Amino acid sequence: MIHADKLLGRFDIEGIVCYPSTDKLCCFSAKTNDDLVYLFVKDKEPNYDYKEFGIRKWGAIHAILDLGDINQPETFKMRLETDDYGYPSVLHTIVNSNIKLTHYLQNYTFLSRQPELLELYKQKRFELTNAATMAQDIFDGNHIKSLTKIGTMLNEKYFRINQTDDGDIYFYFGDENQTIDSAKVAINNRCQPIVWKTETYFSLEYFTQLFRTLGGNESVKMKLTPTQIIMVNEDQQALRVAILRGKNM
């Protein structure tokens, strides 16, 4: 949870799914309510064998982790308690021996008796490891600053992606074919062609938030596609993947 919070803790999301991967690593997956951002974290701590469970709101987990120094295990302890069926149901936390917290999880024994709720959680259970292997490009943080400034100047909350015949990638604000203010920002050359979809727009707020959350600059690898932007950060503790989906306007 500590390593997942570096990504999930920046979003107000509900219905996070935690489950063991086939190689016994702890995975977290979630998406925003508008279905525009998909988030995935795989913790690299080995031999995770708990059954699948859900977290109602990550904000509670973020607040718990923020209470103490998580880098000092002797003063910050977390323990999962399972129900009679072996599913994690309660998270117990002790902070500096002074604070004892009991947080109830959305365990799957309970969810199995509510088909509609269970289906919602199943839709948020996904693994984006394959998507992570597609992200190879490095973005300059100065480009992100330029995007934010231009978006504010033009009062534009969305941008589009296009590639010229010379292979240059541009982020477009507004519409050059209309009598409104517009702008385009050159990113850099790409080998893989991107098909121009005039109707597909990406949220500038989500894009900049994800870039900064994942570390920015060389910490983030990306893959641009006509309909989504894949963003990846990986270190010794965890693999973190975010997918920003475009929307039709």
Image (cartoon, grey):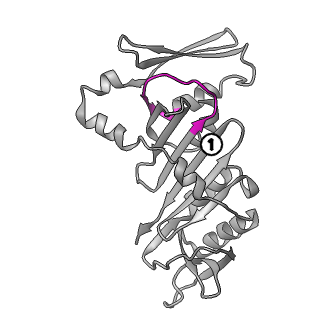
- At a point 23% along the width and 33% down the height, the residue shown is 115
- At a point 63% along the width and 77% down the height, the residue shown is 169
- Residue 189, given in percent of the width and then of the height, sits at 68, 76
Q: Quadrant of the C terminus?
A: bottom left
Location of residue 116 by image quarter:
top left
- Residue 4, given in percent of the width and then of the height, sits at 59, 36
| Residue 58 shown in magenta | yes
- Residue 18, given in percent of the width and then of the height, sits at 47, 32
Look at mark 1 in the image and give the residue it sits on.
239
Span shown in magenta: 42-59
Q: Is residue 183 left or right of residue 86?
A: right
- Residue 37, given in percent of the width and then of the height, sits at 49, 53
| Amino acid type, mark 1 | Leu
- At a point 61% along the width and 58% down the height, the residue shown is 135
| Residue 175 shown in magenta | no
- At a point 73% along the width and 23% down the height, the residue shown is 69
Q: Residues within 10 Å of mark 1 (few under 14, many from 20)?
A: many
In-front residue for pair 204/231: 231
In-front residue for pair 211/135: 135
In-front residue for pair 154/210: 210
Q: Please, what secondary structure does the residue beneath circle 1 have?
A: strand
- Determine whether 6 is above or below 205 in the image: above
Residue at the extreme front of the image, as rendered: 23
In-front residue for pair 229/236: 236
- Determine whether 166 is above or below 207 in the image: below
Q: Quadrant of the N terminus?
A: top right
- Determine whether 14 is above or below 64 in the image: below
Q: Looking at the image, how many numbered discs can be counted on the residues?
A: 1
